Amino acid sequence: VKAERQSYPVYLGSGFDSSVYRRALLGLPMSRIFLVCDSNLFAFHGQRIESNWISTGRSVETLVIPRGERRKSAATIGHLHDWLIARGAKRDDLIVACGGGVTSDLAGFAAATLYRGVRWGICATTVLSMADASIGGKTGINRRAGKNLIGAFWQPSFVIDDLEWLSTLPPREFRSGTAEIIKSSGLAGGRLFKLVRDWSELGFQTDHPGLRQILELTVRYKGSIVARDERDTGLRMVLNFGHTIGHAIEQSLSYRKLTHGEAVILGMIAALGVGERSGSAKSATLVTFSKVLYRAASQLPAVRLSLQDIARSVVVDKKRKTTKYRFVLIERPGRPVVCEIERSMVVSAIRHMLKEYQSL
Ligand SMILES: NC(=O)c1ccc[n+]([C@@H]2O[C@H](COP(=O)([O-])OP(=O)(O)OC[C@H]3O[C@@H](n4cnc5c(N)ncnc54)[C@H](O)[C@@H]3O)[C@@H](O)[C@H]2O)c1
Ligand SMILES: [Zn+2]
C-alpha cells in the first residue's frame, strides 16, 4: 500500500509461520514488540500468534483487551497508554494490533498518540479488517456523540492477513465483512467484480477457494484509492458507497439488530434505487451487481425497519450538504459517481429498499 510518508506491505496467505513475521520486521529497528490482542481472537489463536512473534527473536509483551465496539473508547486508550508506559515502551518499539477493526483502530490510535507517534503493525483477523479497516491508516475511537469522532491518520508498517484466523470467525461477522468486499467489487469492477459474482452464486461460502484472490484484489483496490487520497479529502469518498443510508439504518436501530455490513448491504440496494430514479438506464453489469446484492441481502435476518427513522437519521449524516445530499452511485461496476441529490429522492430510495427487503 502506497502512502505519502511510507509504503507498507500486506502479507496475505494461510497458515503463516514465523518467517513471514520476520519479513514483516525487516527494516524496522530492533525493538520490543507490544501485542494488543482482542480477547476472542486471543482465546483461539493467541498462543500461536505470540509464539510466532517470539520466534523472531524480539522481546514480546501481550495485553488482551475485552472484545466489543464499546471498548473503542478514550478509557481503553488511557489504559493502553498506561500499560505501555508502565512496561517501559520506547519510541522505537513496535505496537502490533491483533484482532478486527476495533482492535486496530484502538491500537493504531494509541500508537499515533504515544510519544507523538510510535510504529505499529496489524495482524488483521476478521474479513472486515482484512478487506477494509487495516488498509488506509485511519485510527480512532468513539464518543457518546458518535462513532469514530476522535482519531488520527497513522499508517502501519505492515499488515499480516492469515486466512486460517477466519476459520473461527462467527458466520455473521464473516458476512458483515463480506459486505465491504461486495462494495469494493462494485466500485472496482473488472476481475474483482467477476470473482465476487461467482462467489455470490455459491452463496458466499466461507471456505471458498477463491477467497484469497478476492481479498488480494480488494486490498489492492482500497490501497489504490487511499494512495491517491490519503487524508480523505475527495476521491476516498467513493468508499462511502452504501454507507450514507447504511449508517442511517444502523443509527435508526441504535446499532443493534443489524451489523454494520448488513446495514451497508441495504444501503447499497438503496443507492442503486437512487441511481434508477435519477433516470440513468441500468446496464447489464449493473443488473448483475444488483443480483449479487440481493443474494447477500437474502442472508440477512428479518428486522423491522422504519422509513421515518432511517430518513431522519440521514439528515444528521456527516456528509450532509445544505439542501442536497452527496451520494455515491454506481453507473456500472467499476464506475462510481458522486452526485448531489434531493431529499425526496433519498426518501424514495429508502422506501424502494424497504420494499425489496420485505419481499425477500
Ligand atoms: N480504520 C478504518 O479505516 C476502518 C474501516 C472500517 C471499519 N473500521 C472499524 O472497524 C470496526 C469493526 O471491525 P470488525 O468488524 O473487525 O469488528 P471487531 O474488531 O469487533 O471484530 C468482530 C468480532 O469478531 C471477534 N474476532 C476477531 N477476530 C476473530 C477470529 N479470528 N475468530 C473469532 N472471533 C474473532 C471479535 O472479538 C469481535 O467480537 C468498527 O469499529 C469500525 O469503525 C475502521
Ligand atoms: Zn463500512
Image: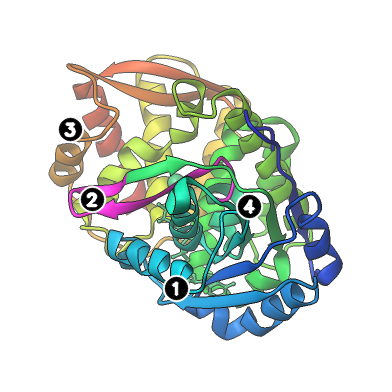
Identify which amino acid the numbered label 3 is placed on.
Val
Residue drawn at point x = 42 percent, y = 26 percent: 328
Q: Main secondary structure of the magenta part?
A: strand
In front here: 150 or 11? 150
The disc, 4 or 1, on the residue closer to the chain's N-terminal end is: 1
Gap between marks 3 and 2, in whole Å? 11 Å
In the rendered view, would you say 263 is above or below 276? below
Nearer mark to the viewer, of 1 and 3: 1
In the rendered view, would you say 85 is above or below 348? below
Gap between marks 4 and 3, in whole Å? 33 Å
**Residue 13 pos. (x, y %):** 79, 60
- Left-right relation of 233 to 11: left
Q: In which quarter of the image is the N terminus?
A: top right
Gap between marks 4 and 2, in whole Å? 28 Å
**Residue 244 pos. (x, y %):** 33, 36
The residue that label 2 is drawn on is: 251
Q: How crowded is mark 3: few (under 14 residues within 10 Å), some or many (20 or more)?
A: some
Gap between marks 1 and 2, in whole Å? 38 Å
Work out which residue is located at the far right of the displayed protein and give it: 19
The residue that label 1 is drawn on is: 86
